[in-house]
Image: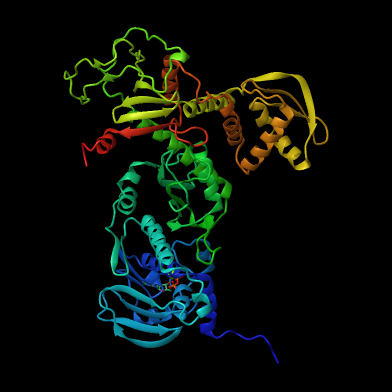
Amino acid sequence: MSRIRLLPEILASQVAAGEVVERPASVVKELVENSIDAGARKIEVSARRGGISLIRVVDDGCGMDRDDALLSLERHATSKIRTSADLAAIATLGFRGEALPSIASVSRFRLTTREPEAVAGTEIIVAGGRIETVRDGGEAPGTQIEVRSIFYNLPARRKFLRSENTESRNIEHQLHLQATGHPEIAFAFVRDERVVFQLPAASSLAERIRDLYGKELVERLLTVEESAGSSKIRIRGLIGQAGVSRQTRAQQLVFVNGRAIESPVLTAALREGYHTALMKGQFPVTFLFLDLDPAAVDVNVHPAKREVRFRDPASVREAVVEAVRGTLESGRRDWQQQFQRPSEHAIPVAPQPNEPSPSEQREFIEAPVSRVIPSRADGEGSHKPPETLSPQEPINVARSSQQFQIIGILNKLYVLMENQDGLVLVDQHAAHERILFEELRRRMEEQGVPSQRLLLAQTFELAPRDAEWVERNVATLQKMGIGIEPFGQNAFKIDSLPTFLDVSDPVSFLRKVIDSLKSASNGSSAMRLGEEMIAKTVCRHAVKANDPLRYLEVEKLIGDLLECDLPYCCPHGRPTMIQISHTELEKKFGRKV
Ligand code: ADP
Ligand code: MG
């Protein structure tokens, strides 16, 4: 007796459904993708009880005639590919011909569809994979699919569903992905008879994001500078400015050829691109689109088509890192403009400041405050000389490049400043770290970090894998001011360290550096390695939080900070400054609601 047999069609579909249909959100994903592939301009999704009781997707796409409608429910039936060459360069979201039969095999399924020109449409009702009814139907041109009682015939799978709330949220997230990926399509989502969102067709990505996530977020996004370098891959979209981050990856959206995907390669690239602009454990906010030759990506690697494989992951990674970096640095220009002083005529002509001695410094130094008569930039002639409130102790803010006005220092740490938008608080410590970091990085790029000879050169041994790593990175380490060279099998000699370092035990310091760099360096460039090293050591050198600073130093600090490539955060991604706008103040004081 033969023990092997072919599975009945329905059972085979249920097996396939195990991979394709994980939860209601996966049904939504497949159906919406079909609607997009069908050229829909408008897609409406409804879900009841987390999609467990009902999912309905209605589109105004090309529809199907009766034969196609019946065929669409067969396994391996697709209109999207014909030859294996097509499989190598997929331009549609679907291609496997598996979704509809899989979904229909694990639910009560109803399909109505009509082609635009046809006089009548078709209605097909399926239960657990068995076709029960086929008849004329279908009102408006397009396709409407209803999926009820998901997994009603597979109680074991049904048990794996989460709460209705969680399933709803998954659906909503899925729709966010689709709606962001296709701003030109109108989307609506109705949850338990309540409209969650109704998005008109948008003329740009920014418009769609605004409709979906609100104006505040859009204002904190930067348009990705289109990469000039590599022509094989086009990168566009919007990404969060430095300092904009989330605790989860929920707003880290990446699309490859219009498909929302999750990719370790791209996640790493984003992290590297943001590098010092991201706090530990935080995720960037991105709406990033990569367009590349379909033949350069394999989309047929994941059952839910959520992942892709790049033919040349290194170049994709490089392109993304460059695009993100360039964009973040360009963000600085807009940011600096925001930093206009309250009025260019507000500089008090003042005598030299009496520098307060540290002992005179109180928690809140009453620095001279100049009240500035607000004036519009174009309001020529309307400026009055500023009213100086503490004439006995004014600050000299004569440097013409300065775009801020220092008011004082809070708690010996925060510099209070005024700019056009309101109040700015700067963390001196974080600011100093950023400045030093960029200075050292520049030196490293140019001629290497200056180093200082140790009194005694030391030799030491490393574990083979560490030794191998050091050998590969000797040149970088030397550029970073670490005088290290191989000294026999797994052994090294160290004879100098960067001048700004003050370590008593060079060898144990080096072991620590190697440990932390090794884990950080996974595949990243030598430059990035150097940055990492600087970021990790620079803290020691930065101003200690309570160092009493003199006014002139504070001014220089702020001036230098403004010249930085990424002034708004320290090398560990913490903010260097916080802006409190006039509007926020007015709200707090109840002047405005
Ligand atoms: P795939 O999308 O991989 O081709 P599906 O099982 O999802 O496989 O769909 C099978 C076929 O049914 C599609 O190739 C398409 O021709 C047709 N189809 C599915 N959904 C729609 C729709 N909303 N509008 C028009 N045609 C559709
Ligand atoms: Mg499909």
Tell which of 264 and 384 is nearer to you.
Answer: 384
The extreme bottom residue here reads 1
Residue 167 higher or lower than 463, as above or below:
below
Visual colour scheme: rainbow
Q: Can you give x and y, in whole percent of width and height, for residue 476 in the image? A: 65, 31
Q: Can you give x and y, in whole percent of width and height, for residue 15 in the image? A: 55, 77
Looking at the image, residue 211 sits to the left or right of residue 463; the answer is: left
| Residue sitting at x 41%, y 69% | 164
Q: Where on the picture, by quarter, is residue 142?
A: bottom left
| Residue sitting at x 60%, y 22% | 447
The extreme left residue here reads 382
| Residue sitting at x 25%, y 17% | 345
Q: Can you give x and y, in whole percent of width and height, for residue 514 in the image? A: 68, 36
Tell which of 18 and 307 is nearer to you.
Answer: 18
Looking at the image, residue 3 sits to the left or right of residue 456; the answer is: left
Quadrant of the frame with the N terminus: bottom right
| Residue sitting at x 45%, y 15% | 550
Q: Where on the picture, by quarter, is residue 163?
A: bottom left
Residue 144 visible to an observer of this rendering: yes
Residue 319 visible to an observer of this rendering: no
